[in-house]
Amino acid sequence: MSIILDIDEQVLASLPLQPGERERLMQIELACRFYANGWLSLAQGARMAGLDHFAFGAALAERGIPRQYGLTEAQEDLAHARRQ
């Protein structure tokens, strides 16, 4: 599924990003915010951001968002480790 955001051109022009970087950064920012709100697990946030677990954890740390580590995350980590 795709979502299209309608953002004012002047606002986009004020961002210090190239056109290709804008979409990518917005995807990561939304995933981080949704994770911080508790709407996504770490695995879901990483998938939404298009990052692996480690890179998504680094993106969270860059934004000062603490990792929430509970039973769901432990089970996801175990499942991921078993696939490796």
Image (tube, rainbow, N blue to C red):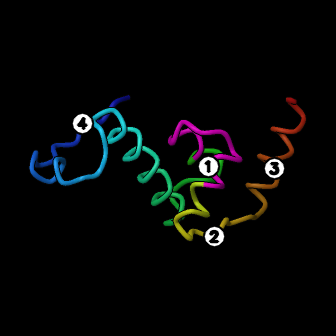
Check the image and report above or below for 34 versus 54: below
Check the image and report above or below for 56 versus 65: above
- State the image coordinates of residue 9 (x, y, percent, origin top left): 10, 45
Q: Which residue type carries mark 2?
A: Pro
- N-term mark: 1 or 3: 1
- Disc sitting over residue 15 in the figure: none
Q: Residues within 10 Å of mark 4 (few under 14, many from 20)?
A: few
Residues at circles 4 and 1 in contact by the CB criterion of under 8 Å: no
Q: Residue at x 56, y 71 (%)?
A: 64
Q: Quadrant of residue 62?
A: bottom right
Q: Secondary structure at mark 4?
A: loop
- Disc sitting over residue 75 in the figure: 3
- Disc sitting over residue 4 in the figure: 4
Q: Secondary structure at mark 1?
A: helix
Q: Is residue 7 magenta?
A: no
Q: Quadrant of residue 80?
A: top right
Q: Decide whether the magenta segment is chiefly helix, strand or loop.
A: helix
Q: Residues within 10 Å of mark 1 (few under 14, many from 20)?
A: many
Residues at circles 2 and 3 in contact by the CB criterion of under 8 Å: no
Q: Quadrant of the C terminus?
A: top right
Which mark lies nearer to you, 1 or 3? 1
Q: Which residue type carries mark 3?
A: Gln
Q: Between marks 3 and 4, how big is the CA–CA gap?
A: 33 Å
Check the image and report above or below for 14 versus 47: below
Per the image, the residue denoted by label 1 is 56
Residue range in magenta is 46-58
Q: Between marks 4 and 1, how big is the CA–CA gap?
A: 23 Å
Q: Which residue type carries mark 1?
A: Phe
Which mark lies nearer to you, 2 or 3? 2
- Count of all numbered marks drawn on residues in the image: 4
Q: Between marks 2 and 3, how big is the CA–CA gap?
A: 19 Å
Q: Quadrant of residue 70?
A: bottom right
